Image (spheres, coloured by chain):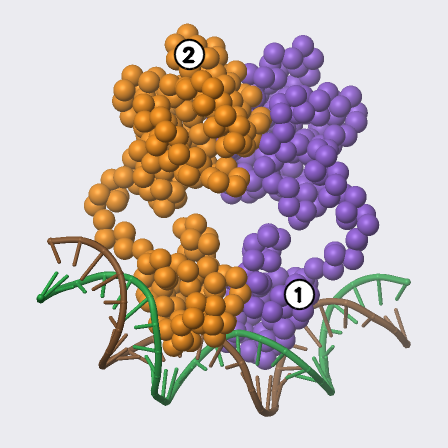
Chain colours: A purple, B orange, C green, D brown
Amino acid sequence: MKILLVDDHQILLDGLKFLLQNQSFVKQVHVASTVEHALIQIQSEVPDLIVSDISIPEIGGIAFAQKVKALFPQTKLIFLSMHEEPYRVKEALSTNAEGYVLKKAAHEELLKAVREVAGGGLYFSTEIQKILIQRMRFPEDERILTDREKEVLRLIFEEYSNKEIGEKLHISERTVETHRKNIYQKTKTNTLVGLLKFALENNLV
Amino acid sequence: MKILLVDDHQILLDGLKFLLQNQSFVKQVHVASTVEHALIQIQSEVPDLIVSDISIPEIGGIAFAQKVKALFPQTKLIFLSMHEEPYRVKEALSTNAEGYVLKKAAHEELLKAVREVAGGGLYFSTEIQKILIQRMRFPEDERILTDREKEVLRLIFEEYSNKEIGEKLHISERTVETHRKNIYQKTKTNTLVGLLKFALENNLV
DNA sequence: TGCCAAATACCCGATTCTTGGTATTTACCC
DNA sequence: GGGTAAATACCAAGAATCGGGTATTTGGCA
């Protein structure tokens, strides 16, 4: 089996490569610390399995995964991430990844995931499974902001006033106020700080 | 040489242990994924060198380092971190650490750092050295917030209004406004959002 | 003791945000 | 073609913040 590891932390990469190479069922392990490098690697030799970080600089692990899955649907994908916020998991799973392992897990868990996924199965850490179950039970959390509202939120985050946002989007300040109002309601926040925290936690900015 | 690795990402820990154990000059490698565990390890057998992450949950790598350095001044310390923000570097160096290596570096760099520090030297990644030089040239960036101002800042981020903050701190709303004004000036921000970003980047909240 | 930074406090006009409405126009789905 | 969500827009009053000030008290250090 040919595996490609993608993570911007070279040190982690080196250590993992070492670990995986010592496994009998692993034939080759390649590594890449940038998305560009990873894509070149993939072009020259398609891996059976990719183990990728989510928070890669620039393009990000999600976009990378989408690209790979689009080009090589047969390639398996496991996310290896330090993040366990629901919104990240949601994003990750939208790429049809076969697995999601937390970095805080022991390396044995990653090996287990690799074996499982290589065998055609799926593997998700306990914490991730809990999130999945939670979402199954409370799907109503899903109604998030509209695109326009997200746009307004982003501009708020870029430190523009309502008036400036209106000018930028070619809408009146009144409309901006309405969007802002709706955003507060949807996010159940009522202060700017609360809103900012929500936005950060939910990766909306 | 006895080395203790501290990081909340078990997978990184496993990989690094593997790497270090293959070095001839390394006798023992212990690992700990929590500060509590690390402290227990240290008590039972004092390591010659500790390689620690900075962003460890709960207590944090800085506080851990301070504790260790206070108890065992002869133990060397290298920070292994994904962070290269000046304020983090500043905090880290306040613990008298002997080294600071970025996680994005190759593992060879860590090995180099370990050898250098074990031999009584210091080792800092190029990026870190750049920050040191920058600070040498522009030391005036140092005047940060006073304790009181930090207190006010924290309450702002707990979503209290100026009036509420005044009540909490038993000072008038006017005084809160003054603090707030001074905070804006010192941080060179003039919107709440900018302030929030500053606070997050500088770990003030 | 004398100096200085920090913390305290107040003034106040201008600006911005908040929050309760209502209403029209688009765009898309069934 | 009718229904619905999204985006647009406006009103208006009250709350809060912003950004100029000035001034006193406190605590620590030289």
Three-letter code, disc 2 = Val
Three-letter code, disc 1 = Lys
> Would residue D2 appear left or right of A200 to someone viewing this image?
right
Residue A118, placed above or below residue A147: above
Residue B2, placed above or below residue A81: above
Pick whichever, B30 or A65, lies toward us. B30
Local packing at callout 1 (Cα closer than 10 Å; few below 14, some 14-19, many 20+) is few
- Residue in the picture at 43% in, 26% down: B51
- Residue in the picture at 47% in, 19% down: B44
> Would residue A74 appear left or right of A104 to someone viewing this image?
right
Q: x and y percent of residue B187 in the render?
A: 35, 60
Res. B116 mark: none
Query: In the picture, which quadrant includes the N terminus of chain B?
Result: top left
Asked whether residue A67 is in view, the answer is no
> Would residue D28 appear left or right of A31 to someone viewing this image?
left
Q: Quick one: SS at disc 1?
A: loop
Pick whichever, A24 or C26, lies toward us. A24
> In which image quadrant can residue C20 be found?
bottom right
What residue would you read off at disc 2? B26
- C-alpha separation, residue under disc 2 versus residue under disc 1: 54 Å
- Label 2 marks which chain's residue? B
- Residue in the picture at 40% in, 50% down: B202
Q: x and y percent of residue B120 in the render?
A: 27, 20
- Label 1 marks which chain's residue? A
Q: x and y percent of residue A185 in the render?
A: 67, 69
What residue would you read off at disc 1? A188
Residue A100, placed above or below residue B147: above
Q: Quick one: SS at disc 2?
A: loop
Residue A106, placed above or below residue B194: above
